[in-house]
Amino acid sequence: MRLPRALGALLLGAVLGGAGSAFQTVFGNPLVEPGFLGVSQGAALGAALALVLGAGDPNLVAVSAFALALLSLRATLLLAKAFRFGGQVLRLVLSGIAVSAFASALLAFVKYAADPLSELPDITFWTMGGLSSMGWGRLAAAAPVALASLAALFLLRWRATILSLDDEASRALGARPELERGAVIVAATAGVAAMTAVSGIVSWVGLVVPQAARALAGPDGRSSIPASMALGAGFVLLCDGLSRSLLPGELPLGVPTSLLGALAFALILAGRRAAVAR
Amino acid sequence: MSLELRALSFRWPEGALALEGATLNLEPGRALALLGPNGAGKSTLLGLASGRLKPCAGEALLEGRPIAAWDRRALARRLAYLPQAERLPFNYYVLDFVLLGRAPHVPALSQPGPGDVERARAALAELGLSALEARPVTELSGGELQLARLARCLAQEADYLLLDEPSTMLDPANARRLAEALRRLVAGGRALLFTSHDAAFSAYAAGEAALLKAGSLVALGPSRAVLVPDLLETAFGLPFKPTSLPSAFAE
């Protein structure tokens, strides 16, 4: 196995795990993750658009991915506010499903309509993810933003815990929930966008890894956010190994992450240690 | 050294006047209970006193400075406001939950240190909750949770405690436990302002009481003088009569 690919897997896993954990903490909602809130799909759409429009510069691709990821997240949050159905946990999940589906459909449209000459990687790369093309160049393009994102989330891990309280309660503790939640979201989204631009959408890691980390290391962000980064790195490295070894040809990375992630999700939510939240 | 509310008025954006000309004073070592019908302005008054709401007339001063002029972290170190209820997002351990009260003392990119943990433990001990520190908050009884939330306020090291309906939803034993805890805090020098619908609880926990009706203070003074049938009838608009039914707060 090549070193840049292994490093890419570790970095991707740490970013997805850490960002998922940060999202779940600041929204006080164990059912959100970058892929559920439209962030990953928006990032993939942004990266694909930049490539179709002829931006060869990896930095431009990453910026476009980041912009569309933030835009999708904004759309999800606005839609959740407008929904007149369900509690706040459910509303966020439902609006995320709608925005993710919309961004995914646009991505497929861009791929098939604007890309007859295959400028873009295959559609399965974007929707199921993959690290087969990860070399030193791509790693170097994504790593600075990804590492900065990890560092910021690590520093903000206790602030994130404060934000998990109701806004009225965190405000009474001297916090500025809107501003601080925005800072955590931007930090997490930047990392996810940078990695998604080079690895495609890798599902379930951001949802299930934080759940496992909370069960293993405790629910406080001080322990669960770093634990999610470590666990995510190990999980994606393992899944990348599986994607190369299960069949004679290579599987998309999203196949093992979804297989194992969905299974673990079911076991965790059905288990006795499931985090209580309504 | 006090929390002074001077002729405070508050108007909702829709134009309805929620509070008109409320004046009261809260000093360390004193406790004041606010009673009145739903919508009389109790929570509004608490909101103005804690800085969440801005008055349309009058002023709220903490230690001589308008509440609005306080930096919000500095304010949270002097004044703790406890909303009536809150959603518990995760099954935090009680100690970690109380430690969140250290938020105004810990710089933004830092983590709470051993000194902060010690303060959180002291807050738990002050309320007799030390045995619960390793329990998840989601497994506490209603009474224990209310005390744990109060411990989070104590971890703020604030001298002024503003509690919105702290005894609502508590059974008599837990309400009594809370009232005794509040008495000890006041005896220890803290200033306490809380809203309540329970005259017996209020008289037990606070030496002073105020009655609000339709946005105006209709009575203010010692609890024994304010929480009497005539004044309660004025505030609530129905006759109040002494009862011989047993109460957890009879002295």
Image (tube, coloured by chain):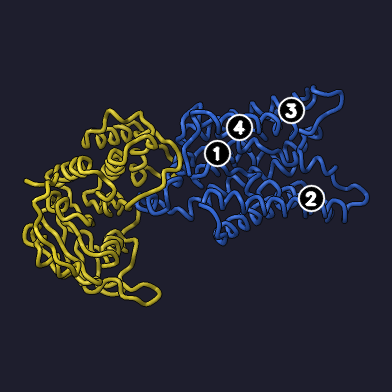
Chain colours: A blue, B yellow
Category of crowding for the residue at label 4, using alpha-carbon neighbours closer than 10 angstroms: few (below 14), some (14–19), many (at least 20): few
Residue annotated with mark 1: A21
Residue annotated with mark 4: A266
The chain carrying label 1 is A
Closest to the camera, between mark 1 and mark 4, is: 4
User: Do the residues at pointers 3 and 4 share their chain?
Assistant: yes
Residue annotated with mark 3: A240
Left or right of A188: which side holds B64? Answer: left
Residue annotated with mark 2: A48
Give above or below for B246 relative to A205.
below
User: CA separation, marks 2 and 1?
Assistant: 26 Å
Q: Residue at x 67, y 53 (%)?
A: A98
Q: Where does residue B153 sit, x and y in percent of width and height? A: 28, 45
Looking at the rendered structure, the kind of residue marked 3 is Asp
Q: Earlier in the sequence, mark 1 or mark 3?
A: 1
Looking at the rendered structure, the kind of residue marked 2 is Ala
Instruction: Give the secondary structure at mark 3.
Output: helix
Q: Where does residue A190 sit, x and y in percent of width and height? A: 63, 46
